[in-house]
Amino acid sequence: MNILLPTDFSENSWNAIAYALDFFENITCNFYVLHVNRIENLVVGDSVYIPTHEEIENNYIKPSKKKLKDLLRKISLRANHNKQHKFYTLSDYGFFIESIRKHVEEKKIDMIIMGTKGASGLKEYIIGSNSGEVIKKVKCTTLVVPEHARYSKIKEIAFPTDFSLSYDINTLQPFANLLNKVKASLRIIHIQKKDTVLNTDQHTNKDVLQDYFEDFKPSFHFLTNKKVEDAIQCFVESRDISLIVMVAKNLNYFQSIFFHSKVEKITYHTHIPFLVLHE
């Protein structure tokens, strides 16, 4: 597997790297640790200052290469000479999303793993802007690791869906591969605002999921709650959920789970990683 680990050298991003090393401990992986120097921050007032190639090299690339080298040392101590893991560093400058897209394509990345800082206050976003942008704008399976998530054996995986979208089998493939590796129980959750019966399309899509995941013996759970995030919170609290999986094209439906929360009691986003699947 080829895995991209974007880093800004923060505690969050280190936590995501540590999680990735444990998560893929027994799997052969190439890890690409990427730092993007954001030259887009050099807009001064109405004018844009474009640094010279030499300035970029001296002020951005060299310092970040040194930091990457130090990080690699820290990783190799943490990885404990795992022969199945190879590490490469990438230093880039420019626009964050463009850089991620470029490396995903060039390095044939299977998964992006990145950290995020959860909501610490009422107005904080659940997912930081970087992670939020990546899951919305980069078509690559992405694992978002919250700041307090620590890897432990994955026992149960929650897959929330409204059954209104038909799922492309290719989209679900990385998820099936994961289930094969971790041997976790799959909980497919349908959340609705009021008691309503599924329509014909929803029944069809439910049957597709049931057939596709048949070998994993999924269980289906129907929850009624005005707020999607409250329903997820109750479900997570009542079980041993260690991963939440979603399909990116359903993100509009799950806006409340990902992008905002004014409820203090929502804790899943500080401890439980999200895996976002793309078409």
Image (cartoon, grey):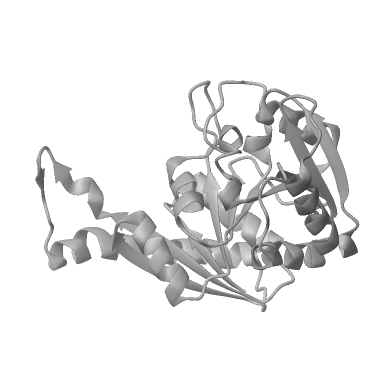
Quadrant into which the C terminus falls: bottom right
Q: Nearer the viewer, residue 254 or 103?
A: 254
Q: Nearer the viewer, residue 252 or 32?
A: 252
Residue 15: x, y in percent? 58, 50
Residue 223: x, y in percent? 80, 31
Residue 58 visible in rendering: yes
Query: Outermost residue toward the front?
Result: 200
Location of residue 54 by image quarter: bottom left
Location of residue 58 by image quarter: bottom left
- Judged left or right of residue 263, residue 11 is left
Compared with residue 92, is residue 264 higher up or lower down, i.e. above or below? above
Residue 183 visible in rendering: no
Picture residue at 15% right of the left edge, 61% below the top: 55
Compared with residue 94, is residue 132 higher up or lower down, i.e. above or below? above
Quadrant into which the N terminus falls: bottom right
Residue 228: x, y in percent? 67, 30
Picture residue at 62% right of the left edge, 62% below the top: 78
- Judged left or right of residue 20, residue 51 is left
Residue 35: x, y in percent? 39, 60
Picture residue at 54% right of the left edge, 27% below the top: 120
- Judged left or right of residue 104, residue 37 is left
Q: How many marks?
A: 0
Compared with residue 239, is residue 3 higher up or lower down, i.e. above or below? below
- Judged left or right of residue 139, residue 193 is right
Q: Nearer the viewer, residue 193 or 143?
A: 193
